[in-house]
Amino acid sequence: MVHNRLVSEVKGVGPALKEKFAELGIETVEDLMTTYPSRYENFEVLPITELVHEQKATIEGIVLSEPVVSFFGRKKSRLVVPIQVDQVVVKGVMFNRAFAKKQLAVGEKVTVTGKWDQHRQQITISHYKVGEKSTGEIEPVYLLRQIITPFQFKKIIKQAFDQFREQINEILPTRYLEGYQLINRGFAIEQMHFPHDVEHLKQARRRLIYDEFLIFQLKMQALRKFNRQRTSGNVKTYSEDQLTEFIAQLPFELTEAQKQANQEILTDIKSSYRMHRLLQGDVGSGKTIVAAIALYATILAGYQGAIMVPTEILAEQHYQSLTELFQDRLRIELLTGSVKGKERKQRLAAIQSGEVNLIVGTHALIQDDVYFSNLGLVIVDEQHRFGVNQRKVLREKGIDPDVLFMTATPIPRTLAITSFGDMDMSIINQMPVGRKEVETFWVKETLMPRIIKFIEKEIKNGGQAYVIAPLIEESDKIDIQNAVDLYHQLSSAFSIPVEIGLLHGRLTNAEKDKVMQDFATNKINLLVSTTVVEVGVNVPNATIMVIYDAERFGLSQLHQLRGRVGRGKKQSYCILIADPKGETGKERMQIMTETTNGFVLAEHDLKLRGPGEFFGKKQSGLPEFKIADPIHDYRTLETARKDAVEIIFNDLIEKNQEYRELKEYLNRILVEFNEGFD
């Protein structure tokens, strides 16, 4: 059992080396063996036809004629040697190693490694060996932060395998090894450090990537099962007739996707386990009505419901739309930071007594003085904007309430099953009938006069417009449009009277609310804003969204901004003003004009920017894997998730002796399981 063996048990590791290993986070033999190379130098000899232009390559041949050395500059030289490789002559070039001329004799066998230039049939040599046939070795390169030398590290890891390779346990049952044709775990780990060839290394990586994903998914599914099982007696019984009557009187027909999500959520509410579900839906797909149905079912069962949103503007909008929807069926109260004094005390008392059925609010809901009578369902909107602790505090306001997280940011499946693998998931991937797609155009700033005329025309016809700028005020460092400057520029740009408003994050909540209220009632025709309008703001009359410096936004953020228009019956437009310099920026703009599907855009965004950028650097939402890459290896991730669901929910790990090693391994890495997850 290599996890029980200390690294100091490896021959050659004394106290000084033990300290150096500790600095690298290596304490056991298992830690040492699973500190994999960050990359490999491939010295495997390949035929000329298989070499890739501008990639590192190794070739073997015969020195055809005497090398020619030319000198230039001060102490600089260039050596050119013709090498015959099969029936092809390759030009080998070496810089500042004139001494090699004496070693590269005509007729001598030589193996050279360097950058391959396919057009010139030339290799710029970085390594060469004379006389001996290449072993085709693949050299591992480790990230050792200059704490220990590569030579020392490789020597110790070789010794570790000599001593302990027989103690590396196989953790997978035979059915997976044979079914997926996976090599033995111990052999795979050893091949990562001492690969026989490229194919062996490929098979080692394939095996260990599956292991990493399976262990992670087992952890996620165990947590998902734990969330389901840890509460019993959580059944909510409500009047099916009353709920059906409420749905029937809605002024629109639910889409099939809404009906499916609705059914999944109601099944959770009626079950004995606690709901822990993520509801994903594109901008305008109708998540709010699905949430409202869930809240009404909970309230019909005699419980209270709460919905927490990130901003006061959004809280106010939810409060108004839910009040219109439920009318006199429920008592709904709003609780935000703006509710103070006597009014706040009265609302808190009504919430605590149970007089209030539904509470809509911001993080004010999780203040210490907020007590619920019988909280049965918590809905957290735009959940990634709240910290884990904030979400946890709200859940603890009730006795094991059901929890529904909602997000209008479509999350690529790859990220969803890693970042939110412990949750059940419902997806609304269908737009309501009759909703028109927003037409999107990408233009340069030189077309602004035409855009101004277009906005004038829409305003004359009763429409409204947003103009988005990335910054609030001018920055000396970045030459991009900003909201304040833009507001002043546009104030004198129109030939007709246009009321222009300004919205940004430095305004007080009261000032923001006033601006948004004026925009919602069309007192303001055009709103110049930063991205504070990105989430949730609903002005059905707005038909134009203009985004300055659009190349500085990610696809998902551009899509969220575009979602602020097209919420009414009129045709709406999104105009991206951008002049991207790189190919990635141009590709982003092109994709935006081609699709309005948020899930498609999210997948593109993930590929173009990576997971860290998708969620923000601090909250990529992805676990740290040693060699697996959820994006590149997503097929293996899908397979591992399917297997983990089967193992956990069929209790195979508990009942089947074949899973004993896997169970022990999982238990060992989940020592803090009960306190590590909430």
Image: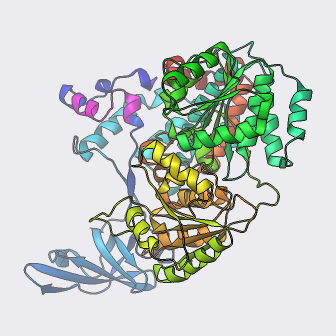
| Residue occupying image coordinates x 70% and y 42% | 321
Q: Nearer the viewer, residue 509 or 238?
A: 509
The magenta stretch spans residue 22: yes
Q: Nearer the viewer, residue 378 or 313?
A: 313
Picture quadrant of residue 666: top right
In the picture, measured across the screen, residue 7 lies left or right of residue 304, that is left
The magenta stretch spans residue 269: no
Task: From this view, report whether residue 525 is shown above or below residue 299.
Answer: below
User: Residue 197, position in %: x, y?
Assistant: 47, 55
User: Residue 615, position in %: x, y?
Assistant: 50, 48
What is the magenta range?
19-32
Q: Nearer the viewer, residue 132 or 502?
A: 502
| Residue occupying image coordinates x 17% and y 74% | 97
What is the tally of numbered marks visible in this picture?
A: 0
Label the magenta part by its dominant secondary structure.
Answer: helix
Looking at the rendered image, the quarter that the C terminus falls into is: top right
Residue at the far left: name it.
74
User: Residue 655, position in %: x, y?
Assistant: 72, 18
| Colour setting | rainbow
Task: From this view, report whether residue 194 is shown above or below residue 26.
Answer: below
Task: From this view, report whether residue 328 is shown above or below residue 626.
Answer: above
Residue 265 visible? no
In the picture, measured across the screen, residue 131 lies left or right of residue 560, that is left
User: Residue 653, position in %: x, y?
Assistant: 67, 23
In the picture, measured across the screen, residue 269 lies left or right of residue 170, that is right
| Residue occupying image coordinates x 66% and y 55% | 599
Task: From this view, report whether residue 144 is shown above or below residue 585.
Answer: above
Residue 556 visible? yes
